[in-house]
Image (cartoon, helix red, strand yellow):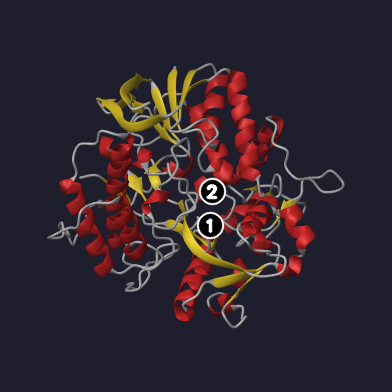
Amino acid sequence: MNVVVVGAGIAGMTAALHAHEAGHTVTLVTKGEVGEGCTPLAQGGIAGGYGPDDSPAAHADDTLTAGAGLGDRPAVETLVAASSARIAELIARGVAFDRAADGSLQRGREAAHSHARILHAGGDATGAAIATALTAAVRRAGIAPVERAMLTGLTVADGTVRGVELLHDDHPTVRTADAVILATGGDGQLYAHTTNPAGVTGDGIAVALAAGAAVADLEFVQFHPTVLASGPAFLISEAVRGEGAVLLDADGRRFVFDSHPDGELAPRDVVARAIAAQAARQDVPVRLDATMLGAATLARRFPTIDRVTRERGFDWSREPLPVTPAAHYLMGGVVTDLDGRTTIRGLYAVGEVARTGVHGANRLASNSLLEGAVFGARAAAALAGPWPAGVHPGPTTPRATATPATEPTATTGTPPFARRALQQLMWDEVGLHRTARGLERALGTIRGWIIAQQPPQSARDHEDAHLLHVAEATAAAALARRISVGAHHRADAEPAAPATARPPILETV
């Protein structure tokens, strides 16, 4: 089988390696170079290193709790059941996870985990270690990479994917395929403040939407609570708070306990909103205090953070760091079943571009690298089997369209489009706090920009088109979900539905 994998992070490279090892002909397409993207930036670890008092069942419970009742239990159980095998595979491929003095894997704890089950490599360089090892494995395998190639569309005929449309070194090209695996990541560049690199522009979601694939949960955008509020966005890992660092207001008080009994170890959405609200009240950033850990521990446990903060003029062993939330991770995406199959025959999605159901309304820390490894492998394994008749993955509740009932139209006198203007609009109206009025304003402005848009020519044009269409679907989804749940917070929320209510699937109309 001729397989095209689009995206070269942990999900894409895992899928490519497994497909190659199963005897398929694999082409690995990436917007930049193999090993770039979000994976090498991941400071946090990979969950699934269970100790004697821990278990996959406990990990599943924590994942479902963090997901605010909207996670899919079968998907979560699939994730945790495969965790040991996928971690063992990463070790076999060359990932040197940190170990204790006795040689055993060293396990850390992060927010909303009931046990220490997070494995790290190089302290806070887990993603970089994984990306390096998988890149080397891809090269050893002789998998053909197509680098500097942007995904601009899918070729679909008779409901079946036939290939991908690319802009390769600024030249349009089409690559045929028997199957396509999307592993393009999320849409972090929708927001003015984000931890995502510049190339994360929602490409996979946009082309899947254009091809008619179902998507869901785009309104669930996780904002990382602690990004250094000085200079370019730089993430301060969740693990810092897991080791004991605390958040302080201008008076030196640990304010997060006002919002949740777990304080700094509460779910990320709670912590992020508490930080944003407190910063607004005091009109200066809140501070993350890790001084109690000491210079030696900080340098050993978090060498990357230690280096970058010192380069920016901070000695975090002596002074707290100013921090702010930033868009970090998308819980929704292209709807898949447990083997990565989408609603278009032959099209798979894995990693952050996919809505597997694992994360529900809020991702549990350090589940994302695990998700990429688990479902990347599962999608590759599914290539050998027949496409199930009548497969329709995802929730089975009545569907909502991407156009909400209020039908907002394009705003009269829409200002000229600029990517920065879109990002600020999304931050202001489709960010940490949302209202119907703000979402309607955002939708009207976005639709005005879409109407005025010219056919894309350059890679930048295609990125802008993708961002606009994913922004429209995200704002529409946020407007349609009138309650507050998980990472989706409506200041004008209606009474909450039962926790077991399933999220809607959103489709193009």
Residue 386 relative to residue 443: left or right: right
**In the image, farthest residue toward the right:** 102
Which quarter of the image is occupied by the N terminus? top left
Which residue occupies 55% across, 37% down?
Answer: 10
Q: Hey, which quadrant is residue 94 in on the image?
A: top right
Amino acid of disc 1: Leu
> In the rendered image of this protein, does residue 503 appear above or below residue 168?
below
Q: Is residue 9 left or right of residue 237?
A: left
Residue of label 2: 76
- 483 with respect to 109 (left or right): left
Image vertical order of residue 336 relative to residue 363, above or below: above
Expressed as whole percent of the image width and height from the top left, the position of residue 413 reads 13, 60
- Badge 2 crowding class, 10 Å Cα cut-off, few under 14, some 14 to 19, many 20 or more, is many
Q: Is residue 55 left or right of residue 401?
A: right
The reply to whether discs 2 and 1 touch (Cβ–Cβ < 8 Å) is yes
> Which amino acid, by three-letter code, is at mark 2?
Val
Q: Earlier in the sequence, mark 2 or mark 1?
A: 1
Q: How many marks?
A: 2
Q: Position of residue 479 (x, y in %)?
A: 28, 62
Q: Which mark is residue 162?
A: none
Q: Position of residue 296 (x, y in %)?
A: 79, 59
Q: Residues within 10 Å of mark 1 (few under 14, many from 20)?
A: many
Q: Is residue 364 visible?
A: yes
Q: Secondary structure at mark 1?
A: helix
Instruction: Name, please, the residue furthest toward the bottom.
Output: 251
Residue plotted at (71% across, 56% down): 116
Tell me where residue 202 appears, x and y as whole percent.
Answer: 37, 43
Q: Secondary structure at mark 2?
A: helix
Q: Nearer the viewer, residue 73 or 315?
A: 315
| Mark 1, residue position | 64
Q: Quarter of the image for the C terminus: give it.
A: top left
291 is higher (above) or lower (below) than 148: below
